[in-house]
């Protein structure tokens, strides 16, 4: 037995052991903090070394596309290899890909095509790693005897805190040590995440799961498509995937196009743009903390629909281009009202999908939702260019509110309040067909 296995075995000796879930949340926080550093450091490095905004856009494309592809196609690998091993391998490979950028910069020289290769690889490995970490949550939640809603709220809070603090820290570090050296810190965060999960998170995958009777007779591609079949067979998951894709499409241009243009035209300060998103992040963190305390007592469907409806209203305020104080208040309210959405979404998926196919379904669901984001950014750019930021915000507010109302009256989504057993779940039936 390896050292990792011995330490992990000790983590399962207690009937109510919270150390593994704390370790997972901490590892995820460290990993996401490193990603937030990279999200600032790489574009800054590209612009500092090339002076080209177009190349920054190309790097952004290669940061997003491989993650979507790997999230969809990698779900089968995660299910076959195991949640913990894939999480550790993803951290290792992502860390090496990020570390290669400063190493090449300081030794052989870093050409733009080589930078794109390293960026592509780092983003590609991040996708399955993120899926694997989320897939670990249900078993660790039961081990800790903590409601899934609370764990998922904490999971989201960690993510929001990392992306709230990471950019500010990155700005300071870039000024002190340079963008390429900041990437070394990101590589270290991947190593720290790997060690935490390796030492403190037990590998519970497959211990209480009936094997798939058809697994041996199907190709990898057929197995991967199980994710699509499960979502199609379960009306709750299907309508959630459709709804999230629509809202992602509508909200995609917020940070990249519509809000920057609104700030530039009416408030005239890049610092104010950063403050808007900082205030939004603070509201979201407060909301997820509150949901962690009481979320498991709330009706999921009603809370989910109301949160979406309330979080659409600030877009109408943005359309008015009010005073900056009112704009900040609306941004804070948008973060505060939207906090329950992702924890509820995670909980419903985790309860309705059997463990043996969990990563494939999670990966497919995420890929379907993310595919709408680049389309939304493209459409948002043309809409702002043609009609202006205020008109775009008004259209988005109306469409988001209509989507939220549709969620509220959709009879299929009332199934979000149920907690189906693994054997009775429609997802199980879909996976076996």
Image (cartoon, rainbow, N blue to C red):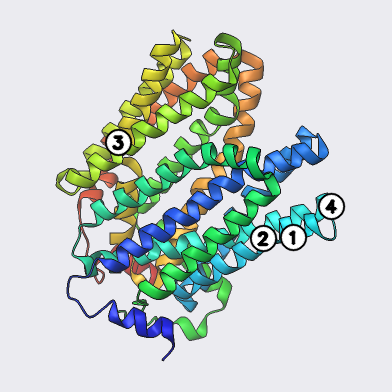
Disc 1 versus disc 4: nearer the observer: 1
Q: Which mark is residue 103?
A: 1
Q: Residue 199: give x, y in percent of width and height.
A: 40, 75
Q: Point out the residue furthest to the front here.
A: 176
Looking at the rendered image, the disc whose residue lies closer to the viewer, 3 or 1, is 1
Q: Is label 2 in a helix, a strand or a loop? A: helix
Query: Is residue 356 left or right of 188 when viewed as pictured?
Result: left
| Mark 4 or mark 3, earlier in chain | 4
Of 354 and 333, which appears nearest the observer? 333
Q: Residues within 10 Å of mark 1 (few under 14, many from 20)?
A: some
Query: Which circle marks residue 99 in the picture?
Result: 2
Mark 2 Cα-neighbour bin, 10 Å: few <14, some 14–19, many ≥20: many
Check the image and report above or below for 233 versus 178.
below
| Residue located 35% across and 35% down the image | 284
Q: Which residue is mark 3?
A: 286
Q: Given this view, does label 2 or label 4 mark the residue nearer the observer?
A: 2
Q: What is the count of numbered marks?
A: 4
Residue 212 point in image, percent of width and height: 39, 80
Q: Is residue 102 left or right of residue 189?
A: right
Q: Which residue is mark 4?
A: 111
* The quarter of the displayed image where residue 1 is located: bottom left
């Amino acid at each position: 037995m390896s050292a990792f296995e011995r330490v992990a075995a000790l983590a399962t000796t207690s009937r109510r052991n919270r150390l593994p879930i704390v370790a997972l949340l901490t590892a995820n926080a460290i990993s996401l903090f490193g990603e937030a550093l990279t999200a600032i450091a790489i574009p800054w490095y590209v612009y500092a070394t090339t002076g080209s905004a177009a190349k920054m856009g190309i790097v952004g494309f290669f940061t997003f596309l491989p993650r979507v592809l790997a999230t969809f196609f990698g779900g089968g690998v995660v299910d076959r290899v195991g949640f913990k091993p894939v999480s550790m391998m993803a951290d290792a490979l992502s860390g090496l890909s990020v570390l290669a950028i400063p190493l090449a910069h300081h030794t052989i020289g870093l050409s733009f095509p080589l930078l794109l290769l390293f960026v592509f690889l780092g983003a590609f490995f991040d996708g399955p790693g993120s899926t694997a970490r989320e897939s670990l949550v249900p078993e660790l939640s039961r081990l800790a005897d903590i409601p899934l809603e609370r764990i998922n709220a904490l999971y989201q809070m960690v993510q929001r805190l990392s992306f709230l603090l990471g950019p500010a820290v990155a700005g300071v570090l870039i000024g002190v040590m340079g963008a390429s050296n900041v990437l070394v810190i990101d590589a270290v965060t991947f190593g720290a995440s790997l060690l935490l999960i390796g030492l403190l998170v037990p590998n519970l995958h497959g211990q209480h799961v009936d094997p798939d009777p058809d697994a041996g007779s199907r190709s990898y591609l057929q197995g991967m498509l199980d994710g699509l079949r499960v979502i199609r067979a379960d009306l709750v998951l299907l309508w959630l995937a459709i709804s999230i894709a629509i809202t992602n499409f509508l909200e995609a241009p917020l940070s990249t196009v519509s809000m920057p243009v609104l700030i530039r035209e009416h408030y005239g300060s890049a610092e104010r743009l950063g403050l808007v998103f900082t205030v939004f992040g603070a509201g979201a963190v407060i909301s997820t903390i509150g949901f962690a305390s009481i979320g498991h007592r709330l009706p999921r469907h009603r809370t989910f629909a109301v949160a979406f409806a309330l979080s659409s209203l600030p877009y109408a305020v943005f359309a008015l281009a009010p005073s900056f104080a009112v704009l900040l208040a609306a941004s804070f309210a948008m973060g505060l009202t939207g906090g329950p959405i992702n924890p509820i979404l995670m909980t419903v998926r985790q309860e309705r999908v059997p463990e043996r196919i969990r990563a494939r379904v999670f990966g497919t669901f995420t890929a379907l939702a993310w595919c709408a984001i680049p389309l939304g950014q493209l459409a948002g750019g043309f809409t702002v260019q043609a009609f202006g930021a205020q008109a775009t915000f008004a259209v988005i507010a109306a469409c988001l509110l209509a989507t939220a109302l549709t969620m509220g009256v959709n009879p299929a989504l009332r199934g979000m309040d149920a907690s189906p057993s693994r054997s009775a779940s429609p997802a199980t039936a879909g996976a076996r067909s």
